[in-house]
Amino acid sequence: MLTLTGVGKRYPTGDRALTDIQLSLPKGQVMALIGPSGAGKSTLIRCVNRLVEPTQGSIRLEDVELTKLSGSRLRHARRSMGMIFQEYALVDRLSVMENVLSGQLGYVGFWRSFLRRYPQEAVAEAFRLLERVGLPHAIDKRADALSGGQRQRVGIARALLQSPKLLLVDEPTASLDPKTSRQIMRLIRELCAERELAAIINIHDVALAQQFADRIVGLRAGEIVFDGKPSDLTSEMLTTIYGEEDWDTTPEPADDDDEESSGATSHVTSPQAATAPHAPRQNRLASGGAQ
């Protein structure tokens, strides 16, 4: 579904962020990007949706060559790629519902979005998504009144309102506590399975990547040094990706049994935790529009 061929990124300073990236992501697969800070993980994700311009190579989403698009054609293609940000990227003064509905900006345009004139079917879908991510009680709350985990759930619902084919997820658990981090990763995993979405998740927590991803790609200095199953991520490979460390003494993650319900409905059983060594963790609505 998504194919990257020979993708590279060099900044005007001469620094090279990515070198000869070769990746193919099939429909429905959840892929985790791991690697040390500065390895190029965020750059790779942003090259896919052209928030960062690659300096070489090809990026194809189904039959569309993304690197050749500009203007309205690029905006149209971005509808197919839902982005979930580390810092949530919500408008604090707007309500939860209004933030979710902003996911329709690529469809309704700026002025209709500014005037809160959304199609009724989009409003109905926003209600369904907020129910699914466990926030039906928070529709009228301002975004700045939410916890970090709730804000991330709003970001997930907003991305899904685009009806994307691909999710690009940039460090979704970086600011969250361990329990909430697991709940958010489980939710993303379940939603991808329900909607047959492919996803690329940039994540620092190797234990979460092993537990919730189908595939792990390790980057170091802008190059792919590992691409395989979570169970294949040995302590030797972690040393290749991150550098020397006693990976075998790193604690295992806690069992799911101690977790309370997150409030979101669970439809898919999460993957069993991998046994390989882990790295340390670091409304008001009127007809046709939101008021």
Image (cartoon, rainbow, N blue to C red):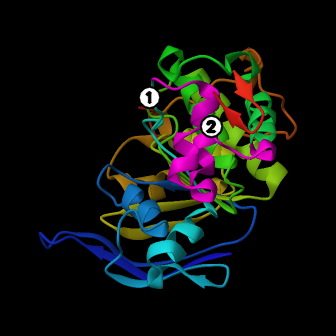
Asked if one can make out residue 276 in the rendered structure from this viewpoint, the answer is no
Q: Residue at x 60, y 16 (%)?
A: 141
Task: Look at label 2 and name its amino acid.
Answer: Val
Q: Is residue 287 left or right of residue 225?
A: right
Q: Position of residue 227 (x, y in %)?
A: 55, 67
Q: Is residue 187 left or right of residue 108?
A: right
Which quadrant is the C terminus positioned in?
top right
Q: Which residue is mark 1?
A: 175
Q: Nearer the viewer, residue 253 or 111?
A: 111
Which span of residues is magenta-colored?
A: 93-122
Q: Nearer the viewer, residue 169 or 40?
A: 169
Q: Which residue is mark 2?
A: 100
Q: Position of residue 65 (x, y in %)?
A: 54, 84
Mark 1 vs 2: CB contact within 8 A: no
Q: Is residue 269 left or right of residue 141?
A: right
Q: Is residue 176 left or right of residue 29?
A: left
Q: Residue at x 39, y 62 (%)?
A: 51
Q: Position of residue 147 (x, y in %)?
A: 53, 17
Question: Counting other residues with Cα less than 10 Å from the Cα at mark 1, is it few (<14), some (14-19), or many (20 or more)?
Answer: some
Q: Residue at x 88, y 37 (%)?
A: 267
